[in-house]
Amino acid sequence: MLKFNYKKVSVANVSFKGAATVFPNPTKNTAHLQLQLQQPETLLITITDMHGRTVYASGFKQYAATNHSIALPLNGI
C-alpha cells in the first residue's frame, strides 16, 4: 500500500523480499515506485487517499527478481 498526500509519500504494508522507495516528493502528476526484488513476486500496488479510500490499484502482476521502476498516475488524486 502506498500512502500519498502533498506532505508525505511513504510505503506501508510492504510484504515481499526486497526494497521499495517512492519518489519524487512532493509530486502532482506522477510518482515512481522503485522496487528491488530478491525473488520473483506477484504484487498488488494500491494507492489510498488520506481517508483510506483506494484511488488506484494495479491489479495483481508478476515481477521478476530484479530492479523495477513503476510510474504511478496521480492526476486527480
Image (cartoon, rainbow, N blue to C red):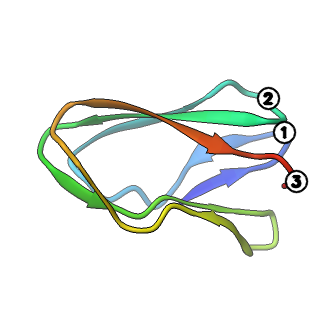
| Residue 50 image position (x, y, % from top left) | 80, 63
Q: Residue at x 84, y 55 (%)?
A: 77
- Tell me the mark number nearer the camera, choosing from 3 and 2: 3
**Is mark 3 in CB contact (under 8 Å) with mark 2?**
no
Spatial CA distance of label 3 from label 2 is: 15 Å
Mark with earlier residue (3, 2): 2
Residue 7's disc is: 1
Which residue corresponds to the image point at 84% horizontal and 35% vertical from the top-left?
28
Q: Are marks 3 and 1 in contact (CB under 8 Å)?
A: no
58 to 31, vertically: above or below: below
Amino acid carrying label 2: it is Pro
Question: At x 80% / y 36%, what residue is drawn?
Answer: 29
Question: Which quarter of the picture shows residue 37?
Answer: top left
Which residue is painted at 79% across and 30% down in the image?
A: 27
Whole-angstrom CA distance, mark 3 to mark 1, is 16 Å
Residue furthest out toward the left? 39
Q: Position of residue 23 (x, y in %)?
A: 61, 27
Per the model, the C-alpha gap separating discs 2 and 1 is 7 Å
Mark 1 residue element: loop
| In this view, 12 is above or below 49 | above
What residue is disc 3 on? 76
Using the rendered view, name the quadrant where residue 67 is placed: top left
Earlier in the chain: of badge 2 and badge 1, it is: 1
Residue tagged 2: 26
Instruction: Describe the element under mark 2 as helix, strand or loop.
Output: loop
Percent position of residue 51, x then y: 81, 72
The answer to which of marks 3 and 1 sits earlier in the sequence is: 1
